Amino acid sequence: MDGSNHSGVSEFLLLGISDIPEQQQVLFWMFLSMYLVTVVGNVLIILAISFDPRLHTPMYFFLANLSFTDLFFVTNTIPKMLVSLQSQNKAISYAGCLTQLYFLVSLVALDNLILATMAYDRYVAICRPLHYTTVMSPGLCILLLTLCWALSIFYGLTHTLLMTRVTFCGSQKIHYIFCEMYVLLRLACSNTQVNHTMLIATGSFIFLAPLGFMIMSYVWIVRAILQIPSASSKYKAFSTCASHLAVVSLFYGTLCMVYLQPLKTYSMKDSVATVMYAVVTPMMNPFIYSLKNKDMHGALGRLLLGKAFQRLT
């Protein structure tokens, strides 16, 4: 494998978390189980929202898209990892690595932007309830989602195209479970200052700006809830935001564990944190949103009972 420049790199080796055969078998079954739970959970959320007219509201419209994004996200990384663990073939082509990187970067950004949009939806629902139907019109919802997709695609393309300019030399061994931005930059032997600058500039816009928006939204939401005289009404208002808050906390918490550190200190120990945001978060989202949601419970029940009835008849 010629490592003189990026065009000479034909493949990378994804070494994963462990190279011990016994541990790899355990990891294979663990990740396969988590992947299947994630797929089933998110598919059920999408189907329940699609087929139940009661859930055809802006909040559930964005939730269905969040589930689709999570489903796409895990499918981008986990199947390849499972093949590597089972077949011991750890090679991934240069084009395959960049493709995986593009979808990884784009979908993480999309997840974040959809969460920010959902925060705006909760703000309008609680702080401007009389205008909710007018403000959160179908047209605006589609426009917001289109903007989320456009920004995430642009974000992914920017960093993937910049990565094609990076020169790799020496070892192409990636001590990670998938092709990740920081890990690839650590393998570079060319100047990556442009990549770092763009990561900071675009990351501030794509991640920090939505986070600031979500914080401000919840400041106004809390103020509005505190003005509600009835304790039961306060609880009901807060319960509509609890699931979103839990998902945002899980998303940003695991993301910060991986990325709030200098690039030079990025090492294999961060694989655990990566598994948290790459596998655990998409798996937990359906449970978080359906745990105490009576509407979702009802929709899932009607969906499953309907399928069971169709089989019996």
Image: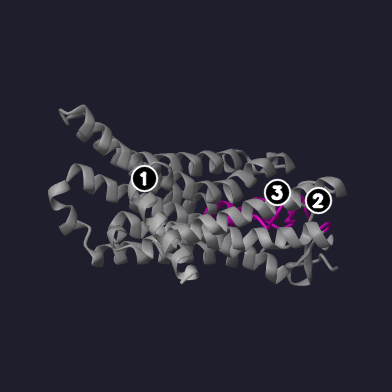
Above or below for 309 versus 208: below
Label 3 element class: helix
Relative image position of residue 119 (x, y in whole percent): 33, 47
Label 2 element class: helix
Kind of residue indicated by mark 1: Asn
Cα gap from disc 2 to disc 1, whole angstroms:
37 Å
Report the front residue among 159 and 230: 230
Relative image position of residue 111 (x, y in whole percent): 46, 54
Label 1 element class: loop
Marking on residue 293? 1
Q: N-terminal of the two: label 3 or label 2?
A: 2
Q: How would you rate the neighbour count of disc 1 (Cα within 10 Å): few for under 14, some for 14-19, many for 20 or more? A: some
* Residue at figure coordinates x 42%, y 47% from the top left: 290
> What span is colored magenta in the figure?
170-198
Report the front residue among 105 and 63: 63
Residues at discs 1 and 3 in contact (Cβ within 8 Å): no
For the N terminus, the image quarter is bottom right
Q: Circle 2 sits on which residue?
A: 25
Q: Residue furthest left?
A: 130
Q: Circle 3 sits on which residue?
A: 30
Answer with left or right where residue 262 lies relative to residue 69: right
